[in-house]
Image (cartoon, grey):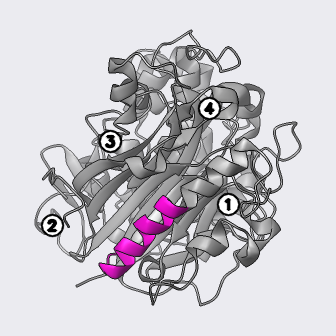
Amino acid sequence: MLRYLLLVAPLVAALGLLPASAEPQIQIGSYKDARAVFWEDLFPGGFEELYCGVSVSAREDHNIEHIFPAFWMTKTQNCGSRRTCRRNSPAFNRMEADLHNLLPTRTSVNAARGSFPFGEVPGEDHDFAGCDFEENSGIVEPRPAARGQIARAILHMTEAYGAENILPDGQLSLMRQWDRYDPPTALEHARNDRIEELQGTRNSFIDAHDRNINNNGLAINGDGAAVTGIDGTRVRVASWNIANLHWKEGEHLPGRPSAPAREASDYKRIANYISAIDADVFTLQEVNGPDAVAKVFPPSQYHIIVSQRFEDDRDQERDTDHIYTAVAVKKSGSVSFIAGQTYNALSIIHDPDGDARPTRAGTEVLLELPNGEPLQVMSVHLKSSCHAGSLDNPRNEDCVTLANQRAPLEAWIDELTEDNTPFIIAGDWNRRIDRFAQNDHLWGEIDDNSPAPLDLARFPEGITSPCLAGTSGHFPDPIDFIVLDEQALRWADRDSFQIVDFKPNDRPHRKKISDHCALYIDLVIPQP
């Protein structure tokens, strides 16, 4: 594609929904007590062994596996050896006794697992006859049917006991993937119910897969059926306006005194949502350059592409709003990053009262999907303050400017349609499109079926946004959208779309997180 200077490079929750906060158990005081409850009340008449998947009627040659190992617990509680922790730390004893973390295993396989982290190892060299269990160089690969259950136990323990910082590198991200791709069975749901009766807490990561209970109230609209039952690779595309994200801790953006001055804990909260969503591609808005993005997207894990306008404004010392579009692409994800560039055509001069300054440019990337097909993704942040005004007869300078952004946006869409390249545009559209739907002066202009077979779909559509509902920051009409062309839409799992509201314990800090909620959708790419 000639539009690019090629930059060649390598290519939680129901369906990833953030669950309600996990809680530590406080009713069972020791592992000794938990062990009796485990065999007598959870598995009194037999069980399916975790690692080998064998149905067992007797306990002989089997014991109890701490999926989140006891050694990790000693580090979490910082209480010394396991023996010392049992003697001196009530918190460790309650953590060790949490039934959500206990499952029956063959004694020999449990010993082989030890405290090793989970992962994927090359080949199929099984360590035990008839058991799909492999350990290689300190990494344990369990059978696929056990991975979701393992993941939800680790995710529960990590959140309930504040153990994120002691997990081995990459473990949390992998567990979120396993949770997403291997949902709980009816037996796992029933076990969660029984554990609540026994110790008073639930595994919220199991509950998050019950869409009737926890789906953020979203009703997904649109033509066509959801993608279900298709063998393929999931690719998650997310977008988030992170609201004046500065790279300097303790300082607001220059010239924007109302912007938040974030501390390390605020960046951590933002990073936690990014980790939980676990997207392969994140389009970003209102970031102050690559160093700001790197505060929450580690460069060792992501390709970071920021609008060239950032460097131009910095080098020319232009007085601007200091916020830019960007894209972050996971290096170990399901897509390959091929190229990235700035779409400067969206950056047009906004000139109210002679105070001329350019609007925000788009940032676009070219990706290769698992089936070898290309996907173009662009992050946009269109002109603000014309949420529903006329663009055909604009009455203020903001609407004039947004109206003028329609032509370059449509030109980008039309060129890719003519090139037969699937695309996604995601970001802050600053437009309440649902107010007038197809008659909206922006949407109707770009979704005009020309050139054929152009046909756009937007997510969300026709819903009230749940973002920050019940707070002064709630706006019922969405302005953030993920827009897919007809080619990208053929892969979309419509039911996967989510607007990720803040957890209750994060709401007091919402002004330091963002005044927007992240949103995402999954594509299911069939095998070639």
- Amino acid carrying mark 1 in the image: Asp
Instruction: Say which amino acid is labelled 3.
Output: Ile
Residue 439 appears left or right of 186: right
- Indicate which label's residue lies in the foreground, 1 or 2: 1
Can you identify the residue that label 1 sits on?
207
Give me the disc on residue 94.
4
Lower sequence index among marks 4 and 3? 4
Cα distance in 3D space between marks 1 and 3:
36 Å
Q: Is residue 428 visible?
A: yes
Q: Nearer the N terminus, badge 2 or badge 4?
A: 4
According to the image, label 3 marks what residue?
Answer: 305
Mark identifier at residue 126: 2
Mark closer to the chain start, 3 or 2: 2
Quarter residue 187 falls in: bottom right
The quadrant the N terminus occupies is: bottom left
The range drawn in magenta is 407-422
Question: Mark 4 or mark 3: which is in front?
Answer: 3
Which is closer to the viewer, label 4 or label 1? Answer: 1
Of pointers 4 and 1, the one earlier in the residue sequence: 4
Q: Distance between the Cα atoms at labels 1 and 2? A: 33 Å
Q: Position of residue 15 (x, y in %)?
A: 55, 65
Vertical comparison of 279 with 226: above or below: above
Kind of element beneath mark 2: loop
State the CA–CA distance, disc 2 to disc 4. Answer: 34 Å
Q: Which amino acid lies under the numbered mark 2 shown in the image of this protein?
A: His
The reply to whether the magenta stretch includes residue 408 is yes
The main secondary structure of the magenta stretch is helix
Residue 406, position in %: x, y? 56, 61
Query: Residue 224 appears at what percent x and percent y?
Result: 60, 90
Q: Nearer the viewer, mark 3 or mark 2?
A: 3
Q: How many marks?
A: 4
| Residue at image location 74% in from the left, 37% down from the top | 27
